[in-house]
């Protein structure tokens, strides 16, 4: 069987090289190339199993997909992303597991796991190894492999996936892909740390743009964000008909049942909300002076408005 990628003079024909029948439902596939040997592998999630294949030579001279290794996980391993030899798997009921594939020993080992029940709807590796995860409760998480206090049963250091950022997006994300709504022209003074940009597709039809921010800039943005959310809530609290986002902290917090927090809803952290900054500009006449006073760092109201406008332009 063949398939054409493009029509007309630019048509490129794909021909089936090898195939394999699996006992179950294949959810996602991803390719991986071993940097040492340059050997390609194919990974596939089938039911609750992650399977690794390689193209092999048949005795009769043909090619086939041969199983290299497999690892059973939880209930239904629906989502998978690959970065180098690391594999992030999103399970329907048990959250996210981080695996490592060793081509020399042909083995899949577990590096870390998110310990709480979570239903991921999409996930994506960032260039720094952190994992961006969306769930069925309209939340967005940033997860990172961290060393746990104490040791595992084997005596080696234990690791788990911990949330290092969280935000209630209010939309159900079903796809995360690298990409931007901007043109690909180079921005002056652009830092490599700003390289990650993602597009989040939602079932509501909204397209969300997500962009990483260099460390030197994010602290200032978080300061402004905190000042805005304090004053915008005061401004809108007297009028219940005002946009619900004025109670930003409540709107963006994570429900305690999601992460099993004993201290109630978890405050948003690790994300700068461009939506809040845009809302500030809409209400700038009432808020600019108050927010500048809350910052209490010498910034004048007019300067703050221009700074927020610049931030919004950088988000766009």
Image (spheres, grey):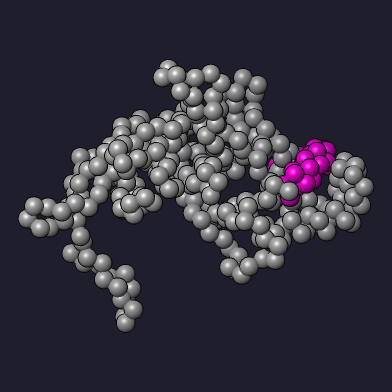
Q: Tally the marks.
A: 0
Q: Nearer the viewer, residue 220 or 241?
A: 220
Location of the N terminus by quadrant is bottom left
Coordinates of residue 267 in the picture (x, y in percent)? 67, 32
Which residue occupies 80% across, 38% down?
230
- State yes or no: residue 267 in magenta: no
Give the left or right position of residue 112, taking residue 170 as reference.
left
- State yes or no: residue 222 in magenta: yes
Residue 38 lies in quadrant: bottom left
Most extreme residue toward the left is 60
Coordinates of residue 72 in the picture (x, y in percent)? 31, 32
Up-down relation of residue 199 to residue 70 (above or below): below
Most extreme residue toward the front is 36
Which residue occupies 61% across, 19% down?
262
Say if residue 47 shows up in the picture. Answer: no
Up-down relation of residue 314 to residue 111 (above or below): below
Coordinates of residue 170 in the picture (x, y in percent)? 59, 43
Q: Nearer the viewer, residue 173 or 18?
A: 18
Say if residue 54 shows up in the picture. Answer: yes
Which residue occupies 19% across, 56% down?
18
Q: Nearer the viewer, residue 150 or 184?
A: 150
Up-down relation of residue 293 to residue 157 (above or below): below
Residue 250 lies in quadrant: top right
Dominant SS in magenta: helix
Give the left or right position of residue 308, taking residue 42 as reference.
right
Region in magenta: 217-244
Give the left or right position of residue 15, taking residue 220 as reference.
left
Coordinates of residue 316 in the picture (x, y in percent)? 66, 60
């Amino acid at each position: 069987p063949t398939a054409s990628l493009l029509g007309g003079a630019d048509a490129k024909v794909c021909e089936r090289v090898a195939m394999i029948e699996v006992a179950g439902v294949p959810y996602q596939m991803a390719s991986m190339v071993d940097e040492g040997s340059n050997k390609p592998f194919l990974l596939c999630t089938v039911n609750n199993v992650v399977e690794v294949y390689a193209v092999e030579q048949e005795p009769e001279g043909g090619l086939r997909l041969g199983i290299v290794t497999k690892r059973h996980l939880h209930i239904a391993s629906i989502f998978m992303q690959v970065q180098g030899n690391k594999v992030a798997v999103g399970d329907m009921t048990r959250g996210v597991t981080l695996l490592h594939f060793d081509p020399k020993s042909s083995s899949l080992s577990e590096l870390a796991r998110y310990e709480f029940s979570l239903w991921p709807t999409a996930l994506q590796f960032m260039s720094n190894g952190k994992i961006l995860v969306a769930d069925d409760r309209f939340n967005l998480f940033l997860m990172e492999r961290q060393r746990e206090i104490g040791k595992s049963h084997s005596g080696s250091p234990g690791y788990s996936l911990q949330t290092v950022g969280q935000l209630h997006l209010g939309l159900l994300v079903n796809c995360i892909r690298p990409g931007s709504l901007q043109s690909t022209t180079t921005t002056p003074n652009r830092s490599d740390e700003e390289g990650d940009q993602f597009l989040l597709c939602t079932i509501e039809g909204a397209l969300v743009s997500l962009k990483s921010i260099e460390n030197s800039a994010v602290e200032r943005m978080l300061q402004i964000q905190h000042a805005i959310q304090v004053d915008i809530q005061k401004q809108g609290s007297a009028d219940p008909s005002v946009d619900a986002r004025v109670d930003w902290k409540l709107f963006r917090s994570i429900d305690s049942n999601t992460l099993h927090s004993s201290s109630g809803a978890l405050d948003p952290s690790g994300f700068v909300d461009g939506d809040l900054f845009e809302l500030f500009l809409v209400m700038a006449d009432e808020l600019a002076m108050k927010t500048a006073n809350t910052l209490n760092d010498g910034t004048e109201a007019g300067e703050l408005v221009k700074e927020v406008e610049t931030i919004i332009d950088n988000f766009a």
